Image (cartoon, rainbow, N blue to C red):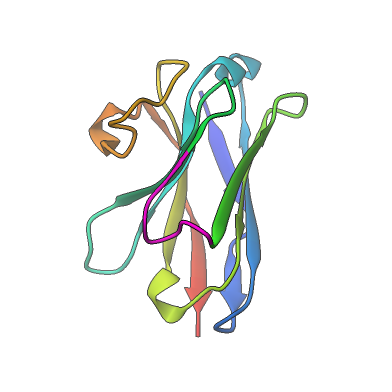
């Protein structure tokens, strides 16, 4: 299984970016998928997750600013980010679990089975 992220880059504070993740296997449409990030010197943190039923979960740090969506036809997961600040600078990773629902422990990254290589987001 391959997850390939795109859409990262540099943006000024207050700006917006949209990240996309394409999965190599259409079967991942039946899995909980989401995004995590890792800032320099910090642990990787879960940002958002979406189950096959469309239910979403967000970390408090990005709630109201980030919106997660999935396109099952194109096998794509997207993260629309707005109101970006330098604190959002990190490598952003797409990930998937081996289950359809994300559950209350969705942010437990050890439970995520598949990971992309990451895309850099820099906010200045």
Question: Which x, y percent locates residue 26?
Answer: 65, 18
Q: Residue at x 34, y 29 (%)?
A: 112
Residue 23 x %, y %: 60, 29
Vertical side of 28 occupied by 67: above or below: below
Residue 117 visible? The answer is: no
User: Image check: 14 left or right of 90?
Assistant: right
Residue visible at 51% across and 23% down? 1
Q: Residue at x 36, y 56 (%)?
A: 60
Query: Does residue 83 show up?
Result: yes
Judged left or right of residue 28, residue 34 is left
Say which of 62 and 111 sits in front: 62
Farthest residue in the right direction? 73
What segment carries the magenta color?
A: 57-64
Quarter-wise, where is residue 105 in the image? Answer: top left
Verify whether residue 68 appears in magenta: no
Q: Relative to residue 68, is residue 111 depicted above or below?
A: above
Residue furthest out toward the front? 64
In the rendered structure, does residue 61 fall within the stretch colored magenta?
yes
Main SS, magenta region, reads: loop
Residue sitting nearer the eye, 66 or 90 = 66
Q: How far across and down, in percent of the image, does residue 61 sit?
A: 38, 61
Q: Position of residue 30 (x, y in %)?
A: 56, 15
On screen, residue 67 above or below 56: below
């Amino acid at each position: 299984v391959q997850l390939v992220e795109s859409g990262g880059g540099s943006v000024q504070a207050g700006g917006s970016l949209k990240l996309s993740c394409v999965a190599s296997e259409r079967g991942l449409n039946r899995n909980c998928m989401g995004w995590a990030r890792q800032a320099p010197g910090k642990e990787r943190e879960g940002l958002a997750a979406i189950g096959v039923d469309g239910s979403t979960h967000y970390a408090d740090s990005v709630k109201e600013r980030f919106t997660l969506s999935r396109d099952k036809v194109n096998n794509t997961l997207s993260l629309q980010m707005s109101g970006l600040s330098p604190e959002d600078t990190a490598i952003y990773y797409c990930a998937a679990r081996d289950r359809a629902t994300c559950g209350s422990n969705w942010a437990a990254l050890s439970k995520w089975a598949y990971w992309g290589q990451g895309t850099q987001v820099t906010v200045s």
